[in-house]
Amino acid sequence: MRKDSDNVRLLEPGKAPAKRKILVVEDNELNREILSSFLEEKFDVILAENGEEGLKILGEHYRELSVVLLDICMPVCDGFEFLRRRNKDKLLSTIPVIVMTGSNSKDAEIQCLDLGAVDFIPKPYNFKIVVGRINSVIKLRESVLTLTAVEHDELTGIYTRQAFFYHAKTLLKAKAEERFHLIVADIRDFKLINSSYGDKIGDEVLCYLAKTYTKMFRDGLVSRYGSDQFVCMTYGDWDLSLETMKKLTEEIAENAPIPNLMIKYGVYEDVDTSLPISVICDRGFMAIRSIRDNYEHSIAYYTEEMNQKQMQDRALENRFESAISNKEFVAYFQPKYDVKIEKIVGAESLVRWINSDGSMVMPGDFIPLYERDGLIVRLDEYIFRHVCEFQRELMEKGQELLPISVNLSRASIHYIGVVDRYVEIVKETGIPFSCVPIELTETATLNNVKIRDFTERLVNAGFALHMDDFGSGYSSLITLSELPFNTLKIDKSLIDCIGQQKGRMVVQQVIILAHGLGMNVIAEGVETAEQVELLREMECDDIQGFYYSRPLPREEFIKKLG
């Protein structure tokens, strides 16, 4: 398949300009020699003595040819026949033809134009005019090819992102009275498609979607927005209801080159045409992000609430540095109780954000955000240091040190040097490693061979490891057996079910399994006396939850310790 890059190869940056190659099709030997001798100084000239030979050469060299000079009157395949046969081949028809003629017949000129000729050179030749016409045609063609290469995606043939921005802006102005809508598409796990089926099939999927969306939105614009993303803008009274969109997307998936093709769609109806095109597109992808981790939904609609949430997120990101400097992030401590003697045996540290006016930024507003943008790594370390310094203060006061666990996010686990920094902080504060256990979530450790080395380094340094939120995700018994956890924390979602027979059996078996592996068991989210009694009967070791205590600021926690 011919690619646009073949046509613009002469224009590649960093290379000296090459001579453009031209084909002269002329039956008169003297005319051929005169043209060749004059043109070869500026061009790479190929000669053909009749139309038949010219078509053969054109078929062999069309990739390199910039223009064809064609005589009309020839005994073997005249110029008219040459043009007719050239037009039957889409590739050959891309090479511009300048007709050379000594005839003054307007009918002949009109016929040549109808057959696709781009210019005329009269005989006898004025060589300045000949060179001028050739250069003009070449320049025009190469400008068009360059624009095409920039405007159209090389694989799918639809608009590139930059071209989409330009043409969408023009369309909005031209159809100012219309209602515009934006639909964006994001292929799920496209890298997995390429690795499973091969790049060729991956390309077929992209081309299939480009063709489908172009057919679907004939009155609009379709763009390949990213490597595996598409943007479609259309106008008019479209039915973009969830029911209709589901039918369309199901049909697209059914006819795809591969089975089970999953695509997330974001719909922005009645777009605000006063916004920049880039912002309009962002709103479509904002809708997709709202269902990014939701496998039950593949279509989402942009709402103003999403925009407000994004603005809030940007504000929280911008406040991070000042919040760190002003020590607005603090640790709260939720006690852990021995279920048998109902005495505090430890605690979990939980980050809280206290504004200067005393109000609190809810953890659900900033923790998931910082996990996405990577700021959580610095916040994790900040809280870890905070807890270590708190333990040092207690130690210096002669108070018994109970283990206060610290959460480590998935991002921190994969951050280079985190173990060394945490070890250094513990040594700086002079506290025992055992008094700051590290909590890792079940999902963060699932099916990741790199985690094994990471956890072993933590344990070898002296840290105790707790598996947090067990049962909240896709629990892996292999993880329990292979990684060096000494404590398992059963997630609240399982504890909530222990009032039911099946739920009680699941929790009981988890406790038996953990004890069999030599692990301590902590039940999280315990809220009722009934749950406490059941867990005591199941021989659960410790309990953490609102039944005994909510997370406490440091002074209240110290009082609680007595």
Image (cartoon, rainbow, N blue to C red):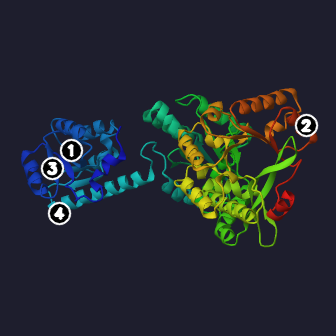
In this orientation, does residue 201 appear?
yes
Q: Which mark is residue 72?
A: 1
How dense is the environment of label 2, judged by Cα within 10 Å: few (below 14), some, or many (20 and up)? few
Q: Earlier in the sequence, mark 1 or mark 2?
A: 1
The earlier-in-sequence mark between 4 and 1 is 1
* Residue shown at 70% from the left, 69% from the top: 327
Looking at this rendering, what residue extends furthest in the right direction?
529
Type of the residue with mark 4: Lys
Q: Earlier in the sequence, mark 4 or mark 3?
A: 3
The quadrant of the image that shows the N terminus is top left
Q: Are marks 4 and 3 in contact (CB under 8 Å)?
A: no
Q: Which of these two is toward me, 75 or 390? A: 390
Task: Say whether disc 2 or disc 3 marks the residue closer to the N-terminus.
Answer: 3
- Residue at numbered disc 4: 128
Please indicate whether residue 535 sits to the left or right of residue 105 in the image.
Answer: right
Q: Of the residues tagged 4 and 1, which is closer to the observer?
A: 4
Q: Nearer the viewer, mark 4 or mark 3?
A: 3
Asked whether the beta carbons under mark 1 and mark 3 sit within 8 Å of each other, the answer is no
Q: Position of residue 47 (x, y in %)?
A: 13, 44
Q: Identify residue for label 2.
A: 533
Distance from Cα at disc 2 to Cα at disc 3: 96 Å
Per the image, label 3 sits on a secondary structure element best described as strand
What residue does disc 3 label? 45
Give the residue type that dot 2 points to: Glu
Classify residue 135 by image quadrant. Answer: bottom left
Q: Nearer the viewer, mark 2 or mark 3?
A: 2
Of 359 and 60, nearer the camera is 359
Nearer-the-camera pick, 509 or 141: 509
Viewer-side label of 1, 3: 3
